Amino acid sequence: MTEGRFPEGFLWGVATAAYQIEGAVAEDGRGESIWDRFSHTPGKVYQGHTGDVACDHYHRYRADVEEMARLGVGAYRFSVAWPRIFPQGRGQANPKGLDFYRRLIDALRERGIVPVVTLYHWDLPQALQERGGWAHRDTAYRFADYAAYLFDRLDEAVPYWITQNEPFVVAILGHVTGEHAPGLQDPMAGFRAAHHLLLSHALALQAYREGGRRHGRIGITLNLSPVEPAGDDPEDEAAARRLDGLLNRWFLDPLFRGAYPSDMVAHFAGLGLPLPEPPQEEMRAIAAPIDFLGVNYYSRQLVRHEPGEPLMAMRQVEGPLPKTAMGWEVYPEGLRRLLERLRHEYTGELPILITENGAAFDDAVSPDGAVHDPARVAYLRDHLLAVSRAIDDGVPVRGYFLWSLMDNFEWAHGYSKRFGVLYVDFDTQARIWKDSAHWYRRVIEANAVVD
Ligand SMILES: OC[C@H]1NNC[C@@H](O)[C@@H]1O
Ligand SMILES: [Ca+2]
């Protein structure tokens, strides 16, 4: 295979998530989510930005699907907002909520675009948070009910299901650092949430497998990063292994080996965080076979030993490489190395989908009306070359979903960070193709990296 070419049938896509693009947060019976509550809580989100309107995708989805068709994508990864389907998280369903996703899926299929549906991308119904949220085991069972409801009604039209998006971020940023909804700072809640997120995946997987007439493939998406020591001090090496243990192995080991990483369990026990031994049948269910692993990759982590840091005795440091607007190093080699590691240590021949990769840069509309984003083109180009090299080495990567179709609500950063290949003017809701969109269209058309 020549450098930068992709296999026949490689799945080219773009990715979004409900709360980040839909808006219409009180329309057609949608219930409140923890991100509605969090973003409306003063001080939590940049300049008080919220997802109330976002990209108004709930109303503009047909035009957005047309843009995807113009890009030539074969697939579109989006998430269903649980609070549209079950406004209270459980009990009474809201048919109007389901109808929106039926309309969206129909529009996609009319254009020959395959829907890739994420069941949970962070917008937990607030009513469930009030019953304990992800720190409460019952939420995992409510999630399985929600998943089964969608499987029963949408499975014929949906060939790919993703149960959870980035459980590390949901557990740690939502329950330990407090940067994300529900904004807790309680390590035990974080570990309980991590387990219940994995349990929710297992229960949804069981519902899918036992549902009989299932047609599609089901997997889970993890945010994964290589973790490297900032210096050559053995203590820094140990700190890197600890962060690797929490960021990567805390989720990969249960899913592929049926147990939490013992070095980390011992580490936390040593801190007086005795993690309850999960029931063996739960760990077996979590390790049940999936059809693909979704990988979200952005950058690497660089760490130093930090004796004073209570949970991990480490701190993340800024690296020397060029950075995106998020302050994340541009490190395409890390993606190839991550894919090689996954194949050798966890996934073997299991198909992998890159369910997110992309970059934020400070884009602006230039006088000629275009948006010139050479740094994003370079980022995407180098990361696609890294994927191509991994595929050449035998890693079974089957698809790539660019984060994101369009600029959107970047969580605690609000609308200040633009990840889209389509620029969104949030005053007019106009979508403007950035140079990277024109470039990505040519990549898809060629099924290869182009200049
Ligand atoms: O930070 C960029 C993206 N990372 N993964 C989850 C998405 O919701 C984010 O927008
Ligand atoms: Ca090659």
Image (cartoon, rainbow, N blue to C red):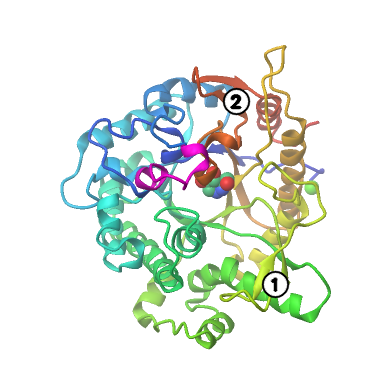
Q: CA distance from mark 1 to mark 2?
A: 37 Å
Tell me where residue 344 sits by quadrant.
bottom right
From this viewpoint, which residue is outermost toward the front? Answer: 42
237 sits to left or right of 189: right
117 sits to left or right of 102: right
Tell me where residue 80 sits by quadrant.
top left
Look at the image and tell me whether residue 211 can be seen. no
Residue 353 colored magenta? no
Name the residue carrying label 2: 423
Q: Residue 178: x, y in percent?
A: 47, 59
**What residue is at 21 percent from the left and 36 percent from the top?**
95
**What residue is at 80 percent from the left and 46 percent from the top?**
322
As drawn, 124 above or below 414: below
Tell me where residue 406 sits by quadrant.
top right
Q: Amino acid at mark 2?
A: Tyr
Residue 36 colored magenta? yes
Q: Nearer the viewer, residue 313 or 59?
A: 313
**What residue is at 73 percent from the left and 62 percent from the top?**
317
Q: Which mark is residue 216?
A: none
Q: Residue 275: x, y in percent?
A: 43, 81
241 sits to left or right of 130: right
From this viewpoint, which residue is outermost toward the top? Answer: 368
Q: Residue 352: x, y in percent?
A: 58, 55
- Kindly state the secondary structure of the residue where label 1 is placed: helix
Name the residue carrying label 1: 240
Query: Magenta region: which residues?
Result: 35-48
As drawn, 44 above or below 211: above
